[in-house]
Amino acid sequence: MIKENLVEYFQTAIKDNWDKPAVSDYNGKTITFGEVGETILKFHLVFEKTGIKRGDKIALIGKNSANWAVAYLSVLTYGAVIVPILPDFLPKDVHYIVNHSESKAFFVASSIWSSVDIDQMQELRYVIGVEELMPLFSRADHLDEVIHSLNGFMQERYPEGLNAENFQLPSTSNNELGEISYTSGTTGFSKGVMLLHNSLAANVRFARAHMPLEPGDKIVSFLPLAHAYGLAFEFLFPFSLGCHITFLTKTPSPQIITRAFQEIKPRLILSVPLVIEKIYKKKILPVVNKSPVNWMLKTPLLNKLIHKKVLAGVKEGFGGNFVEVVVGGAALSHEIETFFRTIGFPITVGYGMTECGPLISYAAAKEAKIGSCGKPVDTLEVKIDSHDPENEVGEILMRGENVMAGYYRNEEATKMVLDDDGWLHSGDLGLMDKDGYIFIKGRSKSMILGPSGQNIYPEEIESVLNNRACVAESVVIQRDGKLVALIYPDEDVVKSMALSNQELEDKLENYRKEMNKDFPAYMRVSRIVLYPEPFEKTPKQSIKRFLYQ
C-alpha cells in the first residue's frame, strides 16, 4: 500500500479550496469545493440512515456532469463501493450490471431512468436522480423523511455551521474496495474490475508528481467518466489538486470540444487519438496540402516559418493555454505524432488499462520518444515476456500498486490474467528499450476505442453476425472512426439458397440493420464489406486481426 490516502486527498482539496469553484457544467451551474463537501456529508447521512453500510455497492449512470462527480465522491468517501456505468449501455445491460454488482442504491440520469425497468433490479433499495440529486424511487419507506430532515441532521452535527475548519470525511483505508468498473455491458463479455482505493490513489499520486497542473488550473472533461482514463485524469487527479473542472454534459463532437477549449482555456488536455486525428485531417492537412504551403514545407528555412505558423494555429484551437496534450486509450497514428512533434506541439502518448486504474506508463511531452507510450509509472513493475525485451516482441506484464484486486464474482477470468506471482497479463505485445520506454507492437486484445472513448469489443458484434445464415466468419474493424464488418460468406449456404451477389448483399444489409437495434450507438456497424476468402489465422485458429485493419 502507498502512504498517500485517496480520501485524504479529497478532504484536503475541499478544506484548502472551500470557496473556490470545483466543478461546473458547461454553460451551466458551478459548485464550489465547500458546496461539494456539504453535499457529500448530506449523502453520507442519507446512506447511514437508510441502512447502506460501508462496502455496499452503489451504481451511478449518466453523462458527465457536476452532479455525477458529486455523487461519485459521496459514495467513495463514505466507504461504499461505486459502480459507474456508461450511459450508452442498453437497458438490459444496465439491469445486468446493477444486479451482478449487487448494488443497493442507484444514481440515475432522468433520460436513462425512463428506459430501465425497476422490476428487473429487485435488490435496489432506492434510486436517486442525478440532475436534482433527489429520490426517484424507493423501497425504503423512510427515504423521503430522511431527505426532508437533512438540514436538521446537519444542524445537529454542526451546530456552529459547516466550514473548512470542521469539515471531516470518514477515514477509509487504501486497502478497501473503492470501485467496480465494468469493461462492457454485454452479459457474456462484461467483467467487473475491482479497484482498491490504493489503485486509484496511486494513479492520483503519480499524476500530481508528473503531470503539469497547479491548484486553480482549469480542466475540460469530455472523456467518459465511467471509464478509468477520463475518471482518473480529468476528474480525480485535478479535483485532488484544487483545480476547476468543467464537464461537457452532452456527447462531445470535435466542434463542441474545440469551442469549449477556446472559451475555458484548459491547462492540461486529455484526449483519445480519434479527436486528435480528426483535428489533423480537417484543420491541418487542408492547409499544408495547398501547393504554395506544400512547396514551402520542402524548402529549408521556409519550412520553419510554416511550422511556426501552423503550431500557433493548432495551439489556439486547443485554447492556447495548455502545457501538454496527453493521448491515451489507443495508439496514435505515427504520421500524425511525427507531424505534431516536428512543429513543436507538446503531445505525448500514455498507456493504461482499466485493470490498472488505468495508468501503466507515461512520459512528459518534452521527454517522450516517437512511437513509444512512455516509461512505467513508479508504482508498477513492468516487464516484457520475451528473451530479448529490446528486440523480441513479448506480452507486457505488470504488477504493483495500480493492479486490480481481480474481477468481481469471476475467479476464472481473474486467474486467466493474474498469475500466482501477482503479474497482470495485459494481452498487449511490445518491446522495452534500454531507457525503459515501452513500444506497443500489437494487441492480442482486440478492443477498439469508440469515438468518445468507449471500449468496443468486436467479438461481441462478431458473435451476433457469425450466428446468421450466410455468414461463415467476420472481423469488425474501425475505419475513419466508424465500425465496418468484413464478412466471408458461407458459400454452401449461399449456394443452397441460390442467392445472387446482390441478393446476398441485401440479406447481409438487413442483418446489419437488425443487429444495430440491439447495440448502443457507438457499437453500431456502419457498413458490411464482403471478403472473398477465409481470413488468415494463427495456429490456434485465431484470426490475425492486424492484417485487416
Image: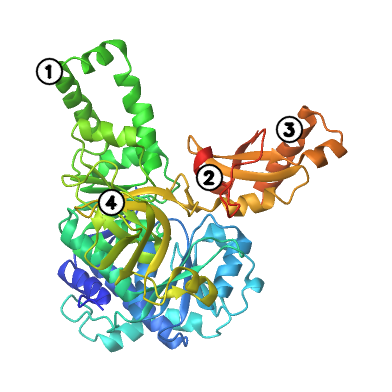
Q: Residue furthest left?
A: 301
Q: Position of residue 389 (x, y in %)?
A: 30, 55
The one of 451 and 106 positioned closer to us in this rendering: 451
Mark sitting earlier along the chain (4/2): 4
**Could you tell me if residue 20 is visible in this image?**
no
Q: Where's the N terminus, which quadrant? A: bottom left
Residue on which disc 1 sits? 301
Q: How is the image coloured?
A: rainbow
> Residue 390 shows which numbered tag?
4
Marks 4/1: CA–CA distance: 37 Å
Marks 1/3: CA–CA distance: 54 Å
> Looking at the rendering, which quadrant does residue 286 occupy?
top left
Marks 3/4: CA–CA distance: 47 Å
CB-based contact (under 8 Å), mark 1 and mark 2: no
The one of 244 and 407 positioned closer to us in this rendering: 407
- Amino acid at pointer 1: Leu
CB-based contact (under 8 Å), mark 4 and mark 1: no
- Amino acid at pointer 3: Glu
Residue on which disc 3 sits? 505
Q: Is residue 175 above or below residue 70?
A: below
Is 284 on the left-hand or right-hand side of 474? Answer: left
Q: Position of residue 19 (x, y in %)?
A: 19, 65
> Residue 545 shows which numbered tag?
2
Image point (27%, 34%), residue name: 338
Label 4 sits on a secondary structure element that is: loop
Q: Residues within 10 Å of mark 1 (few under 14, many from 20)?
A: few
Image point (50%, 82%), residue name: 143
